Image (spheres, rainbow, N blue to C red):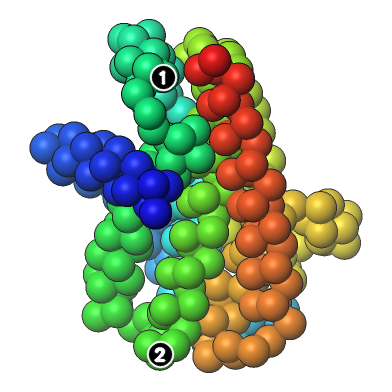
Amino acid sequence: MKLLRDTWLLFSWIMGQTLRNPVWPLIGLFQPLCYLFLFAPLLQSVSGVPGFPAGGALTVFTPGVLVMMALFGSAFTGFGLVAELRSGFIERLRVTPLSRLALSLGYLLRDCVVLLLQSILLIAIALPLGVHINLAGLVLTLGLLILLALCLSSCSYALALLLKDENALSSILNTLSLPIFLLSGITLPLTLAPPILRLLARFNPFAYAVNAARALFTGNLASGDVIQGYLLIGLLALVAIFWVTRTFQRATV
């Protein structure tokens, strides 16, 4: 009960700060919308080639955009924590009776809510363009995005606590995010890739998330891709939450 109360108190305060300045969450939608309106139409001409998944270009592309939004939105949340470390806010939290797990969960819950709102808005914009998804597929896709946010935000916060420097954090995140993005099949399905890229993508957990999201959008709710994606990202989320909680404990003792 104390954990829930502590988490809610911190989440309420952090979420309130975000709502007072909603510019950054809205800016986070700009790049996905550019991909949706300016890149997705280019796929119409290749949607009929062998190897392109069924369902139409937009229905195949939109899940990738959602995963991309989770990747670049959640993975860079650590920058805000570095600023709060420098301002002394985390140090002030240290002397409160808040549990360290609640400290982690408060931030992570805020990130999940922001990503959910962004995702719902993006899907609402994509529906009139021709994207098709049933309610069950939508709910399961949002659940997968929550797991992605938990995983990526946890890793970003842990790195921020360890590095305590925006330049070092930026170097690591930018170095890792580009190959992860390219090997996820976000812009083009990996079924169109040469064998060597498909082999490398097997070691990229976010490729499984993209495949799972695409299966959910096309109505294959119980496919192997969905099960694999949920299990892998769920396991990584648990490990990442454990990591960031331990890092918070060590950084605030």
Q: Which residue is rendered at x = 64% and y = 89% of the image?
A: 222
| Residue 212 percent coordinates (x, y) | 62, 73
| Residue 14 percent coordinates (x, y) | 26, 37
Q: Nearer the viewer, mark 1 or mark 2?
A: 1
Total marks placed:
2
| Residue 45 percent coordinates (x, y) | 52, 75
Which residue bears the numbered disc 1? 94
Which amino acid type is marked by label 1? Answer: Arg
Q: Secondary structure at mark 2?
A: loop
Q: Which residue is rendered at x = 17% and y = 41% of the image?
A: 16
Which residue bears the numbered disc 2? 134
Q: Residues within 10 Å of mark 1 (few under 14, many from 20)?
A: some
Q: Which mark is residue 69?
A: none
- N-term mark: 1 or 2: 1
Which image quarter is the N terminus in? bottom left
* In the image: residue 223, left or right of residue 157: right
Which amino acid type is marked by label 2? Answer: Asn
Q: Which residue is rendered at x = 41% and y = 24% of the image?
A: 81
Q: Secondary structure at mark 1?
A: helix
Camera-side residue: 195 or 99?
A: 99
Cα distance between the residues tagged 1 and 2 = 45 Å
Can the viewer see residue 207 in this picture? Answer: no
Q: Residues within 10 Å of mark 2 (few under 14, many from 20)?
A: few
Q: Which residue is rendered at x = 39% and y = 47% of the image?
A: 2
Up the image or down, 46 lies above or below 71; here it is below
